[in-house]
Image (spheres, rainbow, N blue to C red):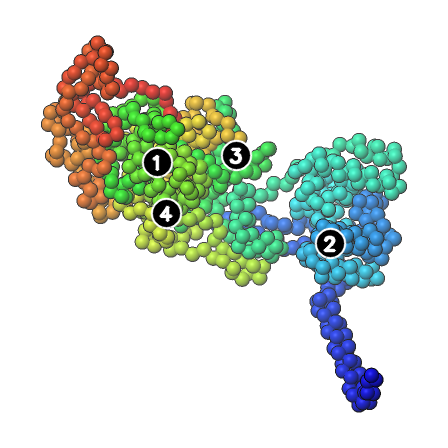
Amino acid sequence: MEQPEQNPIEKIKNADRKTLITSAFGIGLVLFIYFFIFFKLPNPYKLIDYKAIPLSTQIYDRNGKLLYEIYKEQNRTAVKLKDLPPYVSQSTISIEDKDFYRHGGVSIFGGILRAAKEMVVNRKLQGGSTLTQQLIKSALLTPERTIRRKVREIILAVWTERIFSKDEILELYLNEVPYGGQSYGIEVAARSYFNKHAKDLKLHEAAFLAGLPQAPSLYSPYNNPELSLRRRNEVLQQMLDEKYIDKKTYDQAVAQKLDVNPPETNIKAPHFVFHVKRELEEAFGIQTVEEGGLKVTTTLDLDIEEEAEKIVREEIEDLKGYQVSNGASLVTRPPTGEILAMVGSTDYFASPSGAFNVTTAFRQPGSSIKPINYAIGIDRKIVTPATIFLDVATCFPSVPKRYCPVNYDGKFHGPVPLRLALGNSYNIPAVKMLSLNGVRTFVASAPAFLITSFKDPSNYGLSLTLGGGELRMTEMAQAFSAFANRGKPQKLVSILKVQDKSGKELYKFEDPNFIQDVRKPLKHPNSLAIQGKRAISQETAFLISHILLDNFARSQAFGSTSQLVIPRHTVSVKTGTTDDKKDNWTIGYTPNFLTVVWVGNNDNTPMNPYITSGLTGASPIWNGIMTHVLKDQPDLKPIRPANVVGRQVCWTTGTPQGQDQPKDQPGGACPTRFEYFIRGTDGKTGSGSIKTEKKKVWVTKDSDKYVENPNPGDSNIEEKEKTIVTDGISTYCMDCAGDQPSASPTPNP
């Protein structure tokens, strides 16, 4: 059936509608192409004076001393192509773009089609860039890998070829591209690597430099010398293939030794600088840090840092005979958390692992963790500094076998008050303290001290109080700041202020206790203004600090004139050494300064057994740094809270003078000593305290030594009435002859 003929007017309307749609589509397509490709497209004429190197980020110490400049251009000098040996340009063309003089900015077969294949097959937008495209990408475009950027790159490359001659483009390229580190352009690269001008480069040196721009870090002679040499020879082979050189010249060049200048070391406090760089990248992004021209003022005091570096380096040098190869230190201000010095190793530039930052690495803390364990018990009011622990042979239920800790000196010391147990770093009382607290409670309390490395309590046992769990030096500094800050730990900070290239403030650290010049005499910080959450009471913090500053309390283990004493200054300090002798620590503080020191080996090999207490390894370093830091400072003792009271207590029971003291103990009346308590706990003996009673026990006939588990068939034992002390876990005979049996030493003070 025939369709009726369409009305002529309708035909015109339909034609107009189609024309309108086609026009709209065409206009839309043009607008899309314009905004997608041509909008804000850079003009190639900018290449003449364009500075492609991003603005450097400058990192300063707290006093305005420059520590480092990130991606800072150094001595940028343009050179003329005509002044360079021909093999400088020939080597670059050979390895980067052998068809440079034969294409119009892009290579259809070698470039575009290869890039399309990469996109389709490998889903990667890369490959196929000519020298002209590389120049455009480096100088005019961002490094993003998108189809839009690739299209713009191609258009600009063709446009550039219409404006500039091939030699002009090659000259721009040689003056523009990065050659590694802070070397941009062939002239600066020649000076940096060979200490000569580009016009004086030899063939093999020019070939080496030509191979760098593709991957400066990968082909760096400092990072990968063998790969760098292979890359140079690859460039020479390409020059031979392209007939720029003959076989004889090639053989002579390949035989040349690659002698480059040592890397520039114009960086101060390198471990700290790169710690700051990572924090900046997390806060502002990598591109902003590398290109944004930031001005960063840090917390570091360069004077303290350089002295700490010197002391660590010299002391570790003296310890080489004891199988000790590395050391690290961290100096902070407890009330604010500011890092004043960060020495991550003895030498950042040493091979193979000098750049490894031990202050942020996981290590076992040894006995330096003990104060936190005791602080938890005191804060829960289950013990006091006077609580008596039986330091006797003790085994604890454990899987797969019982856990039987011993002390660093191989001896047991009988009934000892908590103060002396912590001061002398006895292991058995510390394990008993953890058994009273519970491992689960200890791990759950760790985050309050800003220790985040302890996760699942089922992963730990009672050895946790002897340093059986790994954490970072930075975490230990944060945790011990709770004692210095009257109960409030502070998170470490490394940046005081960040400004953009125009001077606009992007970040500023503010704290009521902030003091710009930390080397002038400082008073007590304002404890009420210390920020953050409380980990322990100010009373507990005072008691722990007082125990750790008590030179008498540690004298049995360390003597009265050890490296833990800073003349004319009151300092609380704790040492620690792991039982496998792989980690050796000292941590000490005043209200204004805290220093953590570690010594050991990065490969975890054990140190000489002589390094057993922190006195031989870490403590001399700690003493040197703290002596320097406190040089012009007043002596500031911990402030005693009003709720802390002092009492005379019985040595053997820990009870206040006159309260339930044994009348008939050996030697007569109970000797007393002075002790501090949290008010209301001075009459309590605590959950771990001992019970003393007269009872019949078995002793040896010939030596009157106590026999806890007698053999009924033993003819050399008899029953006698003795004074027996028990703490619910262990038993000790007060008036039996001889000492408790010794054991193999565990070096954990």
Instruction: Quickly name the residue at label 3.
Output: 346
Residue pictured at 66% horizontal, 45% vertical = 181
Instruction: Quickly name the residue at label 4.
Output: 448
Answer with mark 1 or mark 4, whichever residue precedes in sequence: 1
Instruction: Quickly name the residue at label 1.
Output: 370
Place of residue 657 in the rendered image (x, y in percent of width and height, measured from the top left): 14, 35
Q: Where 572 sits versus 117, above or below?
A: above
Answer with mark 4 or mark 2, whichever residue precedes in sequence: 2
Residue 87 visible in this rendered orientation of the protein: yes
Residue pictured at 57% horizontal, 62% vertical = 502
Instruction: Quickly name the residue at label 2.
Output: 119
Type of amino acid at the residue the image marks with label 2: Met
Within 10 angstroms of label 2, few (less than 14), some, or many (20 or more) residues?
A: some
Q: Quadrant of residue 410?
A: top left
Depth check, mark 1 against mark 3: the one in front is 1
Place of residue 574 in the rendered image (x, y in percent of width and height, measured from the top left): 36, 35
Q: Is residue 112 left or right of residue 728?
A: right
Toward the viewer: 325 or 379?
A: 379
Residue pictured at 82% horizontal, 83% vertical = 1
Type of amino acid at the residue the image marks with label 3: Thr
Type of amino acid at the residue the image marks with label 4: Ala
- Structural distance between the alpha carbons of marks 2 and 3: 47 Å
Toward the viewer: 344 or 732?
A: 732
- Whether pointer 1 and pointer 3 mark residues with C-beta atoms closer than 8 Å, the reply is no
**SS class, disc 4:** helix
